[in-house]
Image (spheres, rainbow, N blue to C red):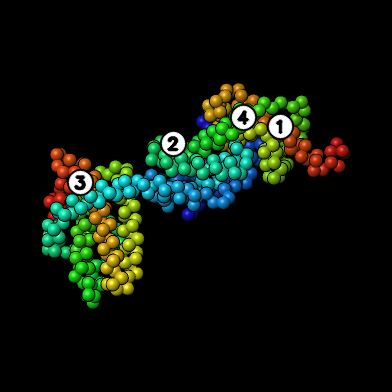
């Protein structure tokens, strides 16, 4: 493209170029995108599984060690700082009249704690491309659950969704924590977010 | 998505001009696409599906092969978008992928695709060149009657504005070969259009 001198082109050749450019464009029929999207999804799925299992293991270890402490601290400071989703559902609206209020309260608290933790870690830990892709996928799923929570009619509807939301946040925490552990790995344990104490 | 020409007269996402690959993709869309966001990838696909398919069709010459070239090129784009460094226009990068895929298919399917064509012995007349008078359907038909690589070189030179040097590199031939294909292709196109005109209006030919 560079170096083309249009003055060198004979007028009839310039007219040919113009006539060719004026030919109508075509689109592939039938639409190619559904096939591309399917291929994309098929390629992504095995990768997601490959990462999901170690992430889940890392999450289980990290959460078993750290969450009891964080939950205790969270009771003292109940305000939420949502980060995993910009539209985190209202945790105060649906807790009063259902038999599972206790579990819902616990899920709300855990959700807030995880979000605070993820926000703090995400600001400090670099993510490699694969972790980032996995994190984006989980964030999308959390967003989907939040949309469903927005339409939940009562605690009975909301409870399974909150369980799902907390599980996804735990996955996300593991992914983010993996980045932090790798970033700050100075002989400390893989998968355990070493700077957690500084978050509170 | 809105059609919005930028200061260089190019377009953000939706092209207006025919055969134009020169579409600028917003950085935000590119960033999301690099992370594998399906919606961003579809946005890019939708913006480029027509220029990509049209270019593939001009090179390979039939709709089914053009469809496969477009599919393979877009898949390659999705696989490699993380490697796009942004130091050249995105559309140029994608266009090169499409050209490479299409030329590879030509080589694979047709072996030695360069058919030598003669210059013809009729010198061009004094009147306006026939492509100025021909409608799109006739011009398209005549273009399809050219040998595949002659048509490709003509299209890459005149429409996509590659230089002879660039075309020579892409086709593995010399600069003079590219120049001769453009000249001979134009000449052949002229004769094909003249013949079409005579066949369409024999009474007119008889009066000349």
For the C terminus of chain A, the quadrant is bottom left
Observer-side mark, 4 or 2, equals 4
Crowd class of label 2 (few under 14; some 14 to 19; many from 20; radius 10 Å): few
The residue marked by circle 4 belongs to what chain?
B
SS of the residue at dot 1?
helix
- Whether labels 3 and 1 share one chain: no
Residue carrying label 2: B88
SS of the residue at dot 4?
loop
Alpha-carbon span between mark 3 and mark 1: 69 Å
**Apparent side of residue B13 relative to residue A153 in the rendered image (left or right):** right
Say which residue appears at 53% left-offset and 29% top-offset: B170
The residue marked by circle 1 belongs to what chain?
B
Q: Position of residue B5 (x, y in %)?
A: 50, 48
Alpha-carbon span between mark 4 and mark 3: 57 Å
Looking at the rendered structure, which numbered label has been put on residue A191? 3
Quarter of the image where one finds residue B59: top right
Q: Is residue A142 above or below residue B165?
A: below
- Whether labels 1 and 4 share one chain: yes
Alpha-carbon span between mark 4 and mark 2: 31 Å
Residue carrying label 4: B113
- Whether labels 3 and 2 share one chain: no
Observer-side mark, 1 or 2, equals 1
């Amino acid at each position: 493209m560079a170096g083309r001198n249009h003055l060198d082109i004979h007028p009839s050749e310039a007219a040919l170029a113009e006539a060719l450019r004026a030919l109508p464009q075509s689109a592939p029929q039938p639409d190619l995108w559904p096939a591309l999207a399917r291929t994309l999804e098929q390629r992504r799925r095995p990768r997601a599984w490959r990462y999901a299992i170690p992430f889940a293991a890392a999450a289980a270890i990290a959460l078993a060690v750290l969450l009891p402490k964080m939950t205790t601290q969270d009771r003292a400071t109940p305000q939420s700082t949502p980060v995993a989703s910009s539209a985190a559902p209202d945790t105060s609206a649906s807790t009063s009249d259902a038999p599972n209020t206790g579990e819902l309260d616990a899920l709300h608290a855990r959700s807030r704690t995880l979000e605070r933790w993820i926000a703090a870690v995400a600001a400090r830990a670099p993510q490699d491309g694969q972790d980032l892709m996995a994190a984006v996928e989980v964030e999308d799923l959390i967003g989907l659950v939040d949309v469903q929570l927005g339409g939940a009619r009562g605690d009975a509807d909301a409870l399974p969704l909150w369980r799902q939301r907390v599980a996804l946040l735990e996955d996300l925490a593991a992914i983010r924590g993996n980045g932090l552990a790798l970033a700050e790995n100075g002989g400390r344990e893989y998968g355990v977010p070493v700077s957690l104490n500084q978050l509170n | 998505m809105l059609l919005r020409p930028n200061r260089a007269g190019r377009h953000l996402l939706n092209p207006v001009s025919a055969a134009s690959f020169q579409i600028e993709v917003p950085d935000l869309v590119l960033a999301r696409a690099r992370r594998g966001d399906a919606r961003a990838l579809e946005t890019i696909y939708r913006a480029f599906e027509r220029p990509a398919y049209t270019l593939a069709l001009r090179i390979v010459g039939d709709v089914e092969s053009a469809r496969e070239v477009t599919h393979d090129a877009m898949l390659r784009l999705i696989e490699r978008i993380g490697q796009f460094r942004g130091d050249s226009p995105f559309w140029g990068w994608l266009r090169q992928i499409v050209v490479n895929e299409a030329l590879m298919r030509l080589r694979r399917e047709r072996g030695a695709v360069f058919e030598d064509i003669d210059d013809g012995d009729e010198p061009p007349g004094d009147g306006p060149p026939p492509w100025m008078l021909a409608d799109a359907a006739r011009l398209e038909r005549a273009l399809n009657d050219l040998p595949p690589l002659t048509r490709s070189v003509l299209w890459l030179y005149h429409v996509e504005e590659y230089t002879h040097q660039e075309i020579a590199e892409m086709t593995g031939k010399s600069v003079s070969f590219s120049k001769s294909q453009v000249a001979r292709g134009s000449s052949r196109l002229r004769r094909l259009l003249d013949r079409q005109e005579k066949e369409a209006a024999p009474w007119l030919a008889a009066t000349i």
